[in-house]
Amino acid sequence: MANVLILFSHSLTKEQTEDLKRMGVNEFIFMPSDLKEKWSGVPPSLESLKDYAEEFISWIKENSKEGDYLIIQGDYGLTAILVDFAFRNNLIPIYSTTERIHREVKLPDGSVRMEKLFKHKIFRRYEKWEE
C-alpha cells in the first residue's frame, strides 16, 4: 500500500479521496499549515525557486518512501521542481484532472453571471518526455 503526500492549496474532495483509495493509497499526508501557507503564497518576484523549494523537499524526504504518490498542483515553477525531484527519488507525481462545466445565470437586473463547476475525473501521472 502506498501513501500520498498532498501538495496543493485546497482540501481533497470526496471523489478525489475515493479515487486515491482505488489507486491503493492507505494514508493521506497533508502539509503542515505553515508549508501550506507558503505553498499558496509563492512570491511572484522571485527569479529562482530553488531555495524556496528546499522546505518542501525536506518535508517530502521526511514523510515519503519509494513508490508513494505526490499530488503536486500549484505554481508552475515550483511544481516543475518538485515533479523532477519526485522522478529522481522513485516517487509518483500525480495531478487531478477535472471536467469543467460552464453555465450562464441570468440575473433579475438583466446581467449575466458565469458559473464554472470543476468536477474531479481522475488523477493522472506526470510523465517524462522521452524520444
Image (tube, rainbow, N blue to C red):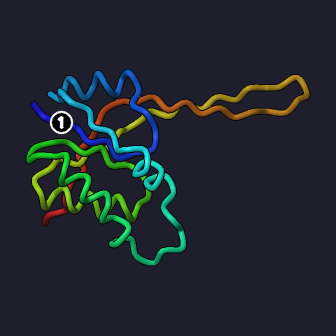
* Residue 113: % across, % down: 75, 33
In the rendered image, the vertical position of residue 26 relative to residue 89, given as above or below: above
In the rendered image, the vertical position of residue 30 relative to residue 107, given as above or below: below
For badge 1, the amino acid type reads Asn
Please tell me how crowded label 1 is: few (under 14), some (14-19), or many (20+) other residues with Cα within 10 Å.
many
* Residue 8: % across, % down: 40, 45
* Residue 70: % across, % down: 25, 45
Instruction: Name the image quarter holding residue 128.
Output: bottom left
Residue nearer the viewer, 5 or 81 = 5
Residue nearer the viewer, 118 or 102 = 118
At 30% across and 65% down in the image, what residue appears?
54
Horizontal side of 63 relative to 82 (left or right) equals left
In the rendered image, the vertical position of residue 128 relative to residue 115, given as above or below: below
Residue nearer the viewer, 106 or 47 = 47
Quadrant of the snapshot with the N terminus? top left
Secondary structure, mark 1, is strand
Horizontal side of 110 relative to 73 (left or right) equals right
Horizontal side of 29 relative to 128 (left or right) equals right
Quadrant of the snapshot with the C terminus? bottom left
* Residue 50: % across, % down: 33, 72
At 37% across and 62% down in the image, what residue appears?
78
At 20% across and 61% down in the image, what residue appears?
85
Q: Which residue is mark 1?
A: 3
Instruction: Name the image quarter holding residue 125.
Output: top left
